[in-house]
C-alpha cells in the first residue's frame, strides 16, 4: 500500500494532474448547460440573424432555380417581416 500512497501523493503534487482534475469537475456543469441550450432549440436549427432588426429569426420561406444556374432563396424575418433574396450555387 505504501507505493500506491506514494503515487497518489505524487499525482496530487503534479501541476498538470491538478489542472486535469479541475477541468473534470467542470464537466457536469457544462453538460447541463449544453442540455439546456439544446432544449431551447426545440429540435430546430436556429434562424439566421436579420440584417434589419438583428433578431435571430430569419428563415428561408421559398426557393427556386434561376436561369443562371443558381438557386434563388427567399428569406424572411419572423420579427420585423423584412426579407431578402439569396443566390446560392
Image (tube, grey):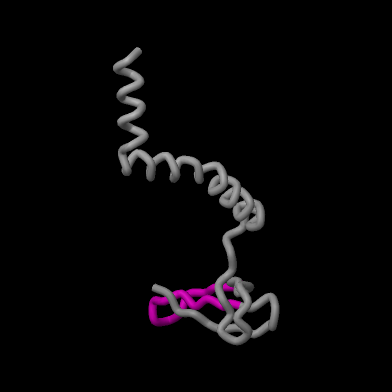
Task: Give whichever of 37, 59 is nearer the camera.
Answer: 37
Q: Is residue 2 above or below residue 88?
A: above
Q: Give me the residue at 31% from left, 25% from top.
A: 7
Q: Nearer the viewer, residue 48 or 3?
A: 3
Q: Is residue 64 above or below residue 25?
A: below
- Of residue 62 and residue 42, the one placed in the foreground of this image is 42
Q: Quadrant of the C terminus?
A: bottom left
Residue under the point 63% across and 84% down? 53
The location of residue 66, given as percent across then percent down, is 46, 79
Task: Look at the picture and state if 76 lies above or below 5.
Answer: below
Q: Which residues are magenta?
A: 61-75
User: At 60% from the left edge and 71% from the top edge, which residue is drawn?
Assistant: 59
The quadrant in which residue 15 appears is top left
Residue 82 coordinates in the image, percent (x, y)? 64, 85
Residue 29: image location, x then y, percent? 57, 46
Dominant secondary-structure state across the stretch colored magenta: strand
Residue shown at 63%/73% (left/top)? 57
Residue 40 spot, x, y in % from top left: 66, 57
Tell me, yes or no, whether the highlighted magenta stretch contains residue 57.
no
- The quarter of the rendered structure image containing the N terminus is top left
**Image quarter for residue 62?**
bottom right
User: How many discs mark residues in the rendered view?
Assistant: 0
**Most foreground residue, 58 or 2:** 2
Q: Residue lying farthest top?
A: 1
| Magenta run includes residue 62 | yes
Amino acid at each position: 500500500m505504501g507505493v500506491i500512497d506514494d503515487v497518489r501523493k505524487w499525482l496530487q503534487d503534479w501541476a498538470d494532474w491538478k489542472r486535469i482534475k479541475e477541468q473534470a469537475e467542470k464537466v457536469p456543469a457544462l453538460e447541463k448547460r449544453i442540455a439546456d441550450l439544446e432544449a431551447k432549440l426545440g429540435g430546430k436549427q436556429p434562424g439566421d440573424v436579420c440584417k434589419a432588426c438583428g433578431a435571430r429569426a430569419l428563415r428561408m420561406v421559398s426557393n427556386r432555380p434561376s436561369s443562371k444556374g443558381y438557386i434563388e432563396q427567399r428569406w424572411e424575418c419572423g420579427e420585423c417581416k423584412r426579407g431578402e433574396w439569396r443566390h446560392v450555387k
